[in-house]
Image: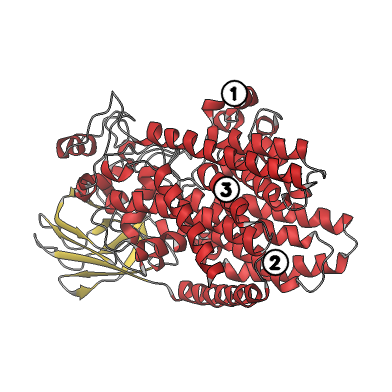
Amino acid sequence: MKKVYKELVAVVGIAVTTAILFNAIFFVPIRLPWDAYYHVSRIENLRQSGLAFLYPQNFTTLGQYGLATNIFYPALTLQIVQTIFFFTHSAIQAFKISMIFTTFLSGTSVYIILRYHSKLGRKIAFFCSILWLSTIGITALAPGNIAESTAYIGIPWLAYGLYACSKETKGQLKKIIAHIAVGLSIAAYSHVMTFFILTMFTAVYLFILLIKNNHKIKIVWVITLGGIVTLLSTAAAIGPILIVQLLNNVKKPVVSTSVFANNVKDLSHLFLNPSDSPDIWLPLFFIMICIVVGSRKPSLGVVLGLIVMLLGTNFTPWPYYLRNSPVTFIQFATRFIKPGIALALMFTLLDLKANQKTHENTKRFHSGLITYGLISVIIMAGVVKNNWFPNSNSQLWTAQHLKEYTTFYDGIHDGYGYSSDMTFSNQISNNERFWYLKNYTDYIPKSALSNPNDKSTFIGADKSGILLTKHQIIDERGQTYNTNNYNPTLKSINMNVQKMIPSNSIIELPILSYKGLRINTTIDGKQQKTFIKHGKIALKLQDALAANSKIKITQQVPNWLIVLNLVSAVTLVTLLSFHKRLQRTDRLT
């Protein structure tokens, strides 16, 4: 009981450190850099129900026209957080809580792995966790990608599974496979791009082990069984993306060849201008120290992690040579930096026990680690304030601002062209117009757009896309009809047509439609036979549609999606039960 109490004290310490790291972010309006708005929108959609992640199309935010957000951005991990903190009163408040809680979970994840598996002492495991959560696990950094930060919760589990696989030990096959699969699954249900990078890393790591390791049969079993188990556990995340993309011609979030070729991190900035990326150079400097003072050469995981990190820098010009290849789907080579440094850091932490020389050196190293962890928290707390808190140029968003930026679409007021210094209060996200800002055309069926350019654009600058955000119906003659009483919920959208539409007209509703998904449409309670035209729900009117007729669109969870979720759920529960049983056999030092 005493040991459990001490472990709880450590976990509380991680929670307190997380709170310190985030300053008083609860009590101030915040800026929403880059991708942050997109994830606030996802969170608002997930707040509607504990099962919201199962409904493919987002009716409640992002323009309220049915973008298949939950297909292309698997939402299980964020859904769990929203279900726990169901009592929030606004999306921005929920976003703040989600940032803090996922950062806490990331630090706790490292602590569990280091204490129960690496057998590090409690104090050292605690400060290692502090170093991790303040640099790798922290969400509140530009561009505010909470999905990517949540995916990093799985890296300690993946790294431990791979680390154990490289050791000359027997009887750990289930343990290794369970940790690898759980780590990759957390990433898959949080951020698909991070999952892809981690999967590539895992494949290369195991391939090298297969060549170098004497226990080749064990490695083959890990590759085979681990691959099958991971395929099953991530089926509900990856399967829907593949199915919907194969059935529909959607606009992918790609960038120009020049952007891909040149969007790399300058190594000189990284090393000579630490303030540019403190969340990278702090762990990188720590890794370098451990390599220099360590009694053993760096492990395979550390070396591979650093190589992955370098792929995102100007160390090698590979993005330039591959700028016209399919690999551009990753958008930015810089995506490799954070996962690479995270993997290198975690393998370094796992090596700490083996790197101890004498008691004197160990004590000195531990003191240095504690100091370094505290310095990291202090530095990153300042970074959080700089990135999110109002500055001297900030102006608080008002309802009038929202109306201005979401009503006029002239290339400047396209829902995105406002100053990054603008700040958002908790209450502003309760304004319906808030969900018409910053709406990309990514993952919209291409036929629903007038802009043939495959590059990412905003829907406010697209002639056909405006029909969706203005909720206008269009017929085969190009005549548009306004709607009113537009009422979106998680599962349905209700609207009334303002004026009569002639019989035999073929009309397109301002709601996206994807092959493979289930949508029902009724007019004044009568079921309608619909089809897809220009990427939207379409139907032919047998009779004239009277003014004020009520149109209702309802989405249902596809049967194939239910099956995939059941397969993944059973697999994940089995994996976690393995871990629980194995955990009982591991006694704390």
| Residue beneath disc 1 | 269
Question: Which residue type carries mark 1?
Answer: His
| Residue beneath disc 3 | 127
Tell me the CA gap for discs 3 and 2.
33 Å
Q: Position of residue 374 (x, y in %)?
A: 53, 39
Question: Which residue type carries mark 3?
Answer: Phe
Tell me the CA gap for discs 2 and 1.
39 Å
Q: Position of residue 345 (x, y in %)?
A: 65, 45
**Image quarter of residue 321:** top right
**Which part of the image, by quadrant, shows the C terminus?**
bottom right
Mark 3 or mark 2: whose residue is earlier in sequence: 3
Mark 2 or mark 1: whose residue is earlier in sequence: 2
- Binning the other alpha carbons within 10 Å of mark 1 as few (below 14), some (14 to 19) or many (20 upward) gives few
| 565 sits to left or right of 265 | left
Question: Compared with residue 267, is residue 492 higher up or lower down, i.e. above or below?
Answer: below
Tell me the CA gap for discs 3 and 1.
28 Å
Q: Position of residue 397 (x, y in %)?
A: 22, 36
- Binning the other alpha carbons within 10 Å of mark 2 as few (below 14), some (14 to 19) or many (20 upward) gives some
| Residue beneath disc 2 | 227
